[in-house]
Image (cartoon, helix red, strand yellow):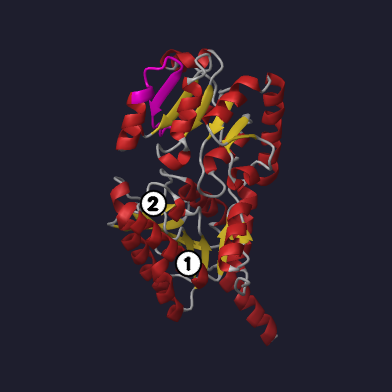
Amino acid sequence: MREMMRTATRNDLTSSQRVAVVGTVGLPPQYGGFETLVHFLVLYLGKKFAFTVYCSGPDYEKRLSAHHGARLKYFPFKANGAQSVIFDCANLVHGCSTADVLLVLGCSGGIFLPFTRPFRKRVVLNIGGLEWQRSKWGPVAKRFLKLSEAIAVRCADVVVADNQGIARYLKKEYGLESSLIEYGGDHITLPLITDEARKRYPFLNAPFAFSVARIQADNNIEMILQAFAQSPSRPLVLVGNWARSAYGRELKARYENYPNLNLLEAIYDQEELNCLRGHCSLYIHGHSAGGTNPALVEAMHLSLPIAAFDVIYNRTTTEDKAYYFRNAEELKELISQVSAADWEACRLTMKAIAERRYRWRVIADKYAETICSSGSQSR
């Protein structure tokens, strides 16, 4: 009887574990992949765990107290850029005093993880992509981010890789096994093209290629523009935050007068964005850094044929069944030489892979198992 009571108590504790989510901009999601991930974890696992999600105060004009049952806690720091380190530190301090499990997304605050050890909290770390490899960072920032990553992965009880390429990197670089949990995309919907949309975006009336990305060098924006600038009969729509950086402004000024190039500023209305990308005839994915990219998974769920930059992350996400390019000339050849029948076959294959691998219910269940499981990573 006593053993039964102890077992019941342990099960009750597991089912009500308090999970603090560290390192995202916050909820409701309005920024990127980690925020969308947290939204669906809270949605699917909110009855199993008591979530606290830390939010970047400057990014939320309207501050809610809860989101799908998760408690929201705001800090007066930006979750990105230089302030992200302070933001993550504040998250960890609060989480150590209130939570059983720290779900840490990203490594910018990794240098603080050793200080959580006296509190004996379980740490589940999703490193995301290899942030230190991004070209937007200078030498000092890259060294700091690499150091922070190294400290973080050694302090975590479990490290999650969202892509097989990241898992291989962790094994080679640090000698550890990681838990492979990818990213969902079945939340994406395909709106109908309205008459208003056709008037606003005339390119919707004919076949066009599409890409959406932050305008930074490691997303190979210039490479994509070069390829389509040399293919005047092939329209391209590229959506991004052109005005945010000198790099983006310079590129837009150089290419915006090409009649086949439609360079649109960032679109934050998801239905409007999905209307454009969901009805394209070819999706161009130029991202080179990171793991399983959310935009790529979403494009696969939209049943789009895909031409992706040739790196291991994109190949593993698409199971080597998309088309790949390493430079502007190779992309130019793809868009001019691959037949309509081959693009159609690619489209169907991408959708099948997405349905099999990238569903939020599956992803949430894997996180639940990881949060609840005992023990630590193999080294």
Relative side of 224 to 315, left or right: left
Note whether residue 187 is visible: no
- Mark 1 or 2, closer to the camera: 1
Q: Which mark is residue 25?
A: 2
Given the image, on which type of amino acid does mark 1 rest?
Ala
Percent from the top left, x then y, of residue 127?
A: 50, 58
Percent from the top left, x then y, of residue 159?
A: 56, 64
Q: Which residue is mark 1?
A: 150
Percent from the top left, x then y, of residue 171?
A: 61, 64
Observer-nearest of 155 and 165: 165
Given the image, on which type of amino acid does mark 2 rest?
Val
- Residue 367 appears in which quarter of the rendering? bottom right
Residue displayed at 43% across by 75% down: 114
Counting other residues with Cα less than 10 Å from the Cα at mark 1, is it few (<14), some (14-19), or many (20 or more)? some
Residue 275 part of the magenta segment? no
Q: Which mark is residue 164?
A: none
- 58 above or below 102? above
Residue range (magenta): 254-269
Observer-nearest of 136 and 75: 136
Note whether residue 273 is visible: yes
- Residue 142 appears in which quarter of the rendering? bottom left
- 168 above or below 278? below
Residue displayed at 42% across by 38% down: 214
